[in-house]
Image (cartoon, rainbow, N blue to C red):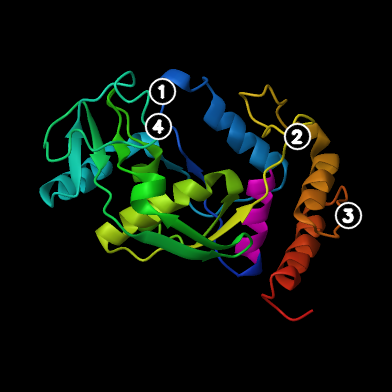
Amino acid sequence: MVAAVASYLDARAHGGQWLVRMEDLDPPREMAGAADDILRTLDGFGLRWDGAVMFQSRRAARYQEILDDLLGGGQAFGCDCTRAMLADASLYPGTCRGRKIGRAYRLEVSQGEVMWDDRLSGHQQFDLSADIGDFVLKRADGFWAYHLAVVVDDHDQQVTDVVRGADLLDSTARHLALMQLLNWPPPRYMHLPVVVNASGQKLSKQTLAPPVDVSQAVPTLQRVFQHLGLPTAATPDLEATYDQATADWAVAFNIVSP
């Protein structure tokens, strides 16, 4: 909800569109009805998205088109390495570089750095060969990797701003490396502090965090605003709440004068 609310406020403060995308790339792990539940939750919290919802599970042909282009240009390669073979490697050692066919497919990362000025987390800099390494574009089980899909979708949807958790900072380095190879303009990024439990673990399904409850939208939004450092106090009138929160967001990030 922190990422959803922050990205929503950022889009509204800029007079832009707020897009919802289902990143349903891993069918074996997907819970039945999860997409519908997400949309119902967003709607219950008064978060109204613009346009049609994009489902990544329906875009395999587009991802294959981009992968074929990368393979044809020698920027990607087939990989037959197993997890056991890579167990002792912190980064992919380049074992299968040069192959056209493999069980999985990786981007061949060249030497150099990626840098960007994050709107909240400040200047970021990653060494491609030392910090990132050749990363997976299509998995050995035939499913598409998040890193390829999200870059292609951001480009195709003409996304100008990405607002998400700081746990994805190193993923952004991968995405920028791929965008550079494709000669695609990057969006602006804002990475937010993640919400953690009492043990310092990120709230997630893996840490058994309870899902948000639509019937508790107001107190949940109060916690979200507190985490984001917004002074707005949520009220039962969600529309008025978001109007004020959008104004507070615009002032906080110098989008308009106070």
Disc 2/disc 4 C-alpha distance (Å): 26 Å
The residue to which callout 2 is attached is 214
- Residue 10 highlighted magenta (yes or no): yes
Tell me the amino acid under the disc marked 4: Leu
Lower position in the chain sequence, tag 2 or tag 4: 4
Residue in the picture at 13% in, 52% down: 73
| Image quarter hosting the N terminus | top right
The residue to which callout 1 is attached is 27
Which x, y percent locates residue 196? Answer: 72, 36
Q: Is residue 238 above or below residue 63?
A: below
- Dot 4: element: loop
Q: Is residue 254 above or below residue 239?
A: below
Q: Do the residues labelled 4 and 3 touch (CB within 8 Å)?
A: no
Lower position in the chain sequence, tag 3 or tag 2: 2
- Dot 2: element: helix
Disc 1/disc 3 C-alpha distance (Å): 39 Å
Stretch of the chain drawn in magenta: 1-12
Which of 87 and 218 lies nearest the eye of the viewer?
A: 87
The residue to which callout 4 is attached is 25
The residue to which callout 3 is attached is 233
Residue in the picture at 60% in, 69% down: 15
Which x, y percent locates residue 125? Answer: 47, 60
Lower position in the chain sequence, tag 1 or tag 3: 1
